């Protein structure tokens, strides 16, 4: 049985003057999904997230959150969202605990003390909970923003660059938290860190110039990446006859020479043809044979080529 639909975005369009920042994007996110929003700077990711959360109105299209239409039942929809904005605002003169208490009161959270203790522990803020926000590092401020998004235990999380400014240990903590939270929530995660999308997302969309280019799983995207399943071979003095024999195979698109002793075998169908290649190498002195998996960042660059960074 399909899990519960929590975010339903249909044909969203937003203009800023003559610029069409978001150009007819549509997608759905179900409970248990972590959807990675990928795209270059200026692609429209933040504008789309602001429309999903009700901060700005679309020129066209609709957003439904947990069954509530954002235009007609905005308050009910927003009650079910936790939002970490790109530059999450906070009152710098407040302590971390005081700020979270303020947010809990604004959200009418039952048993605020328990809720604050829970999110402080979840986001690793225990050591700084009594410091004023102005005195915190960028990484800790980002975690305060994440804590306020979680304070009311929402069904939907919209996270704009949640690990921006975090060191590697802090990133690992937040990525682990996102993976755990996904078990019971629907999460939309904007990021330019491709490794992050591979680690925590079970779906990924690539947006460029306001348009949704592809919606797939990370595995599906990797399969479309340049050099996916290309076989890199290094042998002792490869003979031209070997390269010719490999090039004549039905599954081989081409063989690309790489220096004096290496070549790349490019499959015609993108599949894994290492089992077919190995018998052809019998009797040769082989230094290395490597099946390449393709890289997410290579696909990202190829699909957004020409878009300003």
Image (spheres, rainbow, N blue to C red):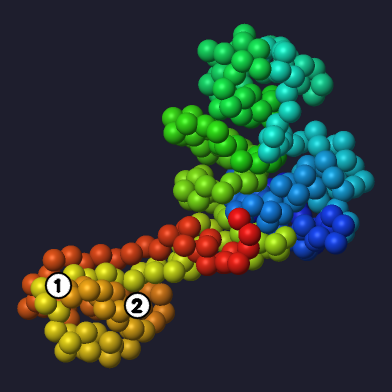
Indicate the quadrant containing the C terminus: top left, top right, bottom left or bottom right: bottom right
What crowding class fits label 2: few (fewer than 14 Cα within 10 Å), some (14-19), or many (20 or more)? many
Regarding mark 2 in the picture, which secondary structure is present there?
A: strand
Cα separation between marks 2 and 1:
17 Å
Regarding mark 1 in the picture, which secondary structure is present there?
A: strand
Q: Kindly indicate the quadrant of the structure image that contains residue 103.
A: top right
Q: Quick check: 63 above or below 170?
A: below
Q: Quick check: 143 above or below 235?
A: above
Q: Residue at x 73, y 23 (%)?
A: 90
Give the image location of residue 87, x and y in percent.
69, 34
Q: Residue at x 64, y 52 (%)?
A: 41
Give the image location of residue 117, x and y in percent.
62, 15
In this view, the residue in front, 258 or 197, is: 258
Is residue 143 left or right of 237 when viewed as pictured? right
Q: Which mark is residue 194?
A: none
Indicate the quadrant containing the N terminus: top left, top right, bottom left or bottom right: bottom right
Q: Which mark is residue 235?
A: 1
Give the image location of residue 38, x and y in percent.
60, 54
- The mark that comes first in sequence, 2 or 1, is 1
Is residue 71 left or right of 120 when viewed as pictured? right
Count of all numbered marks drawn on residues in the image: 2
Give the image location of residue 127, x and y in percent.
53, 12
Q: Residue at x 76, y 36 (%)?
A: 80
In this view, the residue in front, 304 or 54, is: 304
Q: Residue furthest top?
A: 130
Q: Quick check: 259 above or below 97?
A: below
Marks 2 and 1 in Cβ contact (< 8 Å):
no
Q: Is residue 5 visible?
A: no
Q: Quick check: 199 above or below 126?
A: below
What crowding class fits label 1: few (fewer than 14 Cα within 10 Å), some (14-19), or many (20 or more)? some
Question: Which residue in the protein does label 2 denote?
Answer: 266
Q: Residue at x 59, y 18 (%)?
A: 136
């Amino acid at each position: 049985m399909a899990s519960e639909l929590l975010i339903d975005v249909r044909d969203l369009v937003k203009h800023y003057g003559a610029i069409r920042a978001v150009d007819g994007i549509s997608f759905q996110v179900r409970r248990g999904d972590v959807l990675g929003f990928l795209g270059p700077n200026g692609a429209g990711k933040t504008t789309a997230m602001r429309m999903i959360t009700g901060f700005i109105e679309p020129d066209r299209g609709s957003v439904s959150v947990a069954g509530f239409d954002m235009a007609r039942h905005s308050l009910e929809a927003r009650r079910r969202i936790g939002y970490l904005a790109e530059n999450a605002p906070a009152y710098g003169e407040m302590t971390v605990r005081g700020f979270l208490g303020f947010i809990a009161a604004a959200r009418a959270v039952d048993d605020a003390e328990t809720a604050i203790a829970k999110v402080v522990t979840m986001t690793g803020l225990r050591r700084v909970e009594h410091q004023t926000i102005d005195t915190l590092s960028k990484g800790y401020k980002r975690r305060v923003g994440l804590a306020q998004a979680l304070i009311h235990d929402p069904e939907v999380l919209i996270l704009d660059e949640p690990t921006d400014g975090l060191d590697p240990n802090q990133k690992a903590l937040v990525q682990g938290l996102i993976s755990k939270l996904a078990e019971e929530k629907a999460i939309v995660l904007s990021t330019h860190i491709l490794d992050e999308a591979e680690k925590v997302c079970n779906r990924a969309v690539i947006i460029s110039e306001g348009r949704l280019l592809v919606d797939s799983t990370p595995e599906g995207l990797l399969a479309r990446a340049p050099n996916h399943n290309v076989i890199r071979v290094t042998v002792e003095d490869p003979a031209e006859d070997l390269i010719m024999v490999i090039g004549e195979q039905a599954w081989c698109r081409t063989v690309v020479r790489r220096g004096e002793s290496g070549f790349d075998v490019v499959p015609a169908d993108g599949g894994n043809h290492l089992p077919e290649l190995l018998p052809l190498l019998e009797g040769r002195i082989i230094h290395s044979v490597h099946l390449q998996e393709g890289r997410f960042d290579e696909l990202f660059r190829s699909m957004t080529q020409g878009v300003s960074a």
